[in-house]
Amino acid sequence: MILLPRPAILLLLGATGLGASVWSVSSAHDDASVRETVLKSEQDRESGRARLGREFYFTRAMYRGHLGRYPSWKVDFPKADVQFLIGVRRLTNIDAYEFENPVGLDDPDLRKYPFLYALEVGRMALSPGEIEGLRSYLLAGGFLVIDDFWDLDEWRNFEYEIGRVLPEYRIVDIPMDHPLLSSFYEIEEILQVPNRGLGAAGGRTWECWNPCDPELRGIFDENGRLMVVINWNTDLGDAWEWVEQPWYPWRYSNFAYKLGINMIVYGMSH
Amino acid sequence: MGPLLANVFEFLFKYRPVVFENGRFVFGAPWPVLLLLGVGLVLLLFPLISYLRVHGRLNRLDKAVLTGLRIAVLGLVVFCLLRPMLVVATVVPQENYLGILLDDSRSMQIVDGENTRSEFIREQFGPDGSDLVTQLADRFKLRLFGFSESIERVSGSDELTFTGNQTRLGQSLDRARAELSTVPLAGLVVFTDGADNSEAPLNETIMQLRSRGVPVHAVGIGRETFDRDIEITRVEAPRAVLQGSAVAVDVMIMHSGYSGETVQLNVEDGGRIVSSQDVELPRDGEIATVQAHFEVEEPGPRLLRFHIPTEANELVEENNEREVLVLVRDRREKILYFEGEPRFEVKFLRRAVADDENLQVVIFQRLAENKFKRLDVDDPDELAGGFPTTREELFQYRGLILGSVEASFFTHDQLQMIAEFVGQRGGGLLVLGGKSAFAEGGYANTPVDNVLPVVLQAPVDDDTDRFFAELDVELTPFGQSHPVTQISGDPATSEERWAELPAVSTVNPIFDVKPGASTLITGSGDGIEDAVVLAFQRFGRGRVIAFPVQDSWIWQMHADIPLEDMTHETYWRQLLRWLISSVPDPVIASIPKDRVGLEERVTITTEVTDSAFLKVNDADVRAYVLPPSGVEQSLELEWTVEEDGEYVVDLVPQEEGLYEIRVSAERAGEPVGEAITYFEAAEPVEEYFGAQMRSSLLRRIADETGGRFYTPETVATLPEDVRYTESGSTVYEEKDLWDMPIVFMLLVGLVATEWGFRRYRGLI
C-alpha cells in the first residue's frame, strides 16, 4: 500500500511494459505505444471525454470503516485499479474505462455500475444508508467482489456487515467447477495471493495470526445467481498493484489477473 | 336516372333512355340530304337578309334576337323534314333466352325494408306469377337459377330457401353463362343484394361476359345503408403466438346510427373475458379501429370471440360478433445472440428471459481476440465452430440478435446469409446498439444494411470524438399501441410508464428510418431530438428490429426503478417474442379461413422446405385430419406444380366442431418436418357481414357488360329495356324522332318567344 502520483504510475507502467506475463500476450504494443496510450488516456481523462459511454467501469465501493485515519476502502487505490484495468483492456476486448471509479454505497449512482469491488472489509462498518444502498444494488442485479481481508476476526466483521445487508442469504463455498472459474481462463487452483511485504519476498503468504488457506466463497440468490464473490485470506489487489515490479512473483500476479478477469466476465454475463 | 326523371324523359323524348343508349341516330328523309340541307340554308338566309334590310325602330340587339329566333324555328323545321330516327336492335320475341339468377343466400333474410329481401323475390317469382315475369316471359324464354355458394336451376322462388352460406356472384354468373352458351342468350338478370363474400375477383367474369356480348342486368335488393347497425368488420390477430405472450389485436368496427355513442368490446377466450374496453363510435360511415390487448395463457388452439353487446333496434345482430382462431404454442424458441464483447446487456437480457420457458437465448460471445464463449447451448457441438457458416446451422434459430460486433468480423457470405436469414428463412433479426454496431461497426452498404429498418449515417472516424447521448425515451403514436411496448397493462398506462423510465445511452447516431419502416420509440436529450430508439420493418418473410441502445439494462438497475419492477423483463420478453412470432417452420400448413361451413370444400395448403429453407418438390406429404369425433383420416397431398414446395389437398368437413390437421413431410424416407393447423367447422356467418346492398358493385357489373342497374322501384321497366340488345336473335327497329313532344314544344316555345319579344319591344 504505497501511494504514488498517478502520472508517475502510468509512466512507470508504460516504461516497464508491466513485466508480468499478462503483458507478454501481445507483442504488438511496444513500450512507446503503451506510453503514448497511457498519456492519451490521461488527457482524455482530464477532459472527461473518455468516461462517456463506456461499457465497463471498475467501480470501487466507498464505505464507512476505519483503518486509523485512512479509510479502509481506499487500500491500494487507485494504482491497483488502474493497473488492473490496463490488463483487462489488453487481455479482453471489454470496452473498459481506463481509470478508477470510486462510488459510495449510499450513492444512487452506484446502480449505474453493475460491477463493484470492495476490499479490506474486515474494517467495514456500514451506515444504514449504505446497507440499504448495497442491498438494493445486489437485489437489482449488481455483482460484488470482496477482496483482501484476513483471518477470523475480519471474517466475522464482514459476515456481520453483509448479514445486515442480505440477512436472508447465506454465505457458501464456491465449488471449483463453478462457471466463475472458467468464464475466461480455466482456473484449477485457488492461490493465496500475498501482499507486497510478505510472500512476495519469498516468505509466508498469509496475513493471519496462524497459517490460513485462501477461500473462495459466495452468496447466491434464490434463483442460484451469484451476487457476491468473497475472496478471503488473499489479496488480489496487491498483485494488481505491484504487477509491474520485477520482484513481485509472476505466479501470484498471473493468478490475480486471471481470477479478476474471470470475475468481471462472469459478472457481465451471468 | 331516377324513376321520376325517367318518366319525364320518356314524356319529352317519346322513348325511354335505353332506346337512345342502344340506338343509332340516322336521317330517314326520302330525298337526298344535301338537297334538303341546301333548301334549308336558303330558308335560313331569307329571314337573315330580311331583318338586315329592315330599318326603323329596330336596334342591333333586336335584330340579332329576332334573326336568331327565326333561324332556330326554321332550323327545327328543316331538322324534322330530314326525318331523324333511331335504329335500334331488338330481340325477336320468344327466340331468345334470358337467364335470371336469384340470390338464395342468408343475407336475403335481412329485414331492411318492410319485409325481408327475399320477399321481393318470392313475390315476383312465386307460383302466383307477377307482371314482371309475365312481361319477360312474353318476350323471352326464361331460365331461372338460384345461387349462393353454388348455382342450381330452379323453376320458381318456392324452390329457394335463402339459407346459402355464401354469395359467390362471379362464379354464379360464369356458370349461368356457360349453361346458356348453346342458346341465343339475350342477357342475364341477377336479383341480389350484391353482398358478395367469395373474395374472388370479378374482373375475369366481367371480361368474359363482355367479350361474349352478354349484358348483365342487376336488380339490387335491400338498402345501401342500414339505419341502425353495429358490425365488427374485421379482426386482425396473429395466427400463432407463444404461450404467455402479450397479444395486440386490431378490431375494426363500423356502424350506422350510433354516432358518438359508447359501446363495449369484449374479448372472450373459452368463455372467460380476457379484455374489455369501451369504444366511442365515430361518425356514420367511419370505421373505428381499436386494439384489444390481452395475454394468452393456455396452449393449443384458442377460439377467441370478439363481441359487442347488441344495442337497441339493431338491424343485424349476428354481425356484432367475430371469432378468430389463434394457435397458442407451448414450445421453446431458440434465438442466437452474438455479442462482440463482454457487455452487461448480455447478463441482463439473460436474466430477463431466464424465467420465460418459451424463449431460449443462446449466447455466442467474443471475449477477446479469437476467444469466444458459448452460453445456454443445447449440446457441446452447438456453435463449436464459431458463428454459423452454413444456412442449415444458422437457420435452425428463429431469431438472431447482433450486438456490438463489427461487420468485418463476418465473411461476405455470412453477411449475405444473415440477410437471407430474414428475407428467405423468415427469421427475426434484432440489431442492438454499440460501438461496433450499425454504421460504427461498418455495416453501411453491406447485405445486412439492406435489411435494416434504419438509415445508417457516416460513422465518426475519430475515436476520441465518438457520438454519445443519453436519451429520454418516448413512444411514437404508432408505438403506443404496439404489442412490444405494452409494458404495463394497457396502452395508456404503458405510455405513462415509458415516460417515467430513466434515460438510456447510445453511441449510434440514427435519426431516420427507411421507407416502409415504423418507429416505435424515439429518444431526446443531450441536444438530440427524436433519435431512433426502436424501429422495425418487414424484409421478405422476416422482421428486422433496430434497437440502437447500448444499456437497456439501466431500466433494471437504475436507482429510480423499484426492485419489484418488471419493466425490463417484460420489455425484453415481449420484444423477443414479437421478433419471432411470425417466423415460419420448415413445413407450414394453412387453411384459407378459420371457420368453414359443413360440406364446404376447404383446401389444405402446405409449404415444404428443407433445413436450409429451400423449397422441396419431391416430398411425401400427408395430412392427418382429426375431426371432433376423433376418427383420424389420412390424406395425401399433391405438389401443385405451379408453386415450388406447395402441396394441396381438399377436405370436406362432415361434422361440426374443431378440426386438427397435422401435416407430416418426408423426403426419401427421412422426415422433413411437421406442421399443425386447425379450423372450426360451423355454420358460416359471412353473410351477415357487409350485408348492405352493394349498388356500386352491381352497377359496375351492369355498366361494364352493357346491362342496366335496377332497384325494386325501377324494375318494372326491365322487360322493355331488356329488349334492346344486340345479343341473341335480333331485328332492327326504326324509331322516328321528329314527332317527339320536345320538338313540338320547342317549336311553339321559339315562336312564342319571338312574339313575346316583339310585344315587349313594342314592335307589334
Image (cartoon, coloured by chain):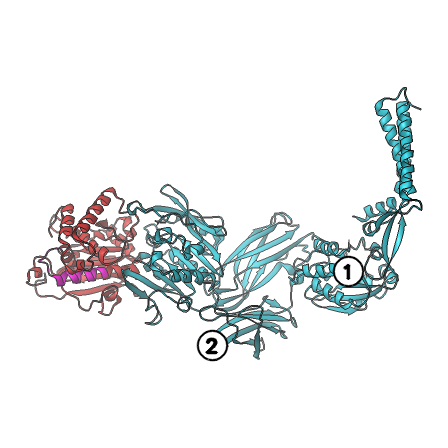
Q: Residue B220's image quarter?
A: bottom right
Q: Amino acid at mark 2?
A: Pro
The crowd level at tag 1 (other Cα within 10 Å; few <14, some 14-19, many 20+) is many
Question: Total marks drawn?
Answer: 2
- Subunit that carries the residue with mark 1: B
Point out the image quarter for the C terminus of chain B.
Answer: top right
- Secondary structure, mark 2, is strand
Q: Amino acid at mark 1?
A: Val
Residue B90 or B547: which is nearer the viewer? Answer: B90
Chain coloured cyan? B
Q: Horizontal and vertical percent for residue A8? A: 13, 47
Residue A101 or A44: which is nearer the viewer? Answer: A44
Give the spatial CA distance, label 1 vs label 2. 53 Å
Same chain for marks 1 and 2? yes
Q: Residue furthest top?
A: B56
Q: Horizontal and vertical percent for residue A221? A: 29, 63
| Range drawn in magenta | A244-261
- Subunit that carries the residue with mark 2: B
B51 up-or-down from A157: above or below: above
Q: Main secondary structure of the magenta part?
A: helix
Q: Is residue B717 visible?
A: yes
Q: Residue at x 78, y 54 (%)?
A: B708
Residue A256 counted in the magenta span: yes
Residue B446 counted in the magenta span: no
Q: Which residue is mark 1?
A: B214
The crowd level at tag 2 (other Cα within 10 Å; few <14, some 14-19, many 20+) is few
Q: Horizontal and vertical percent for residue B54? A: 91, 23
Q: Horizontal and vertical percent for residue B475? A: 45, 49
Q: Which residue is mark 2?
A: B671
Chain coloured red? A
Q: Is residue B487 visible?
A: no
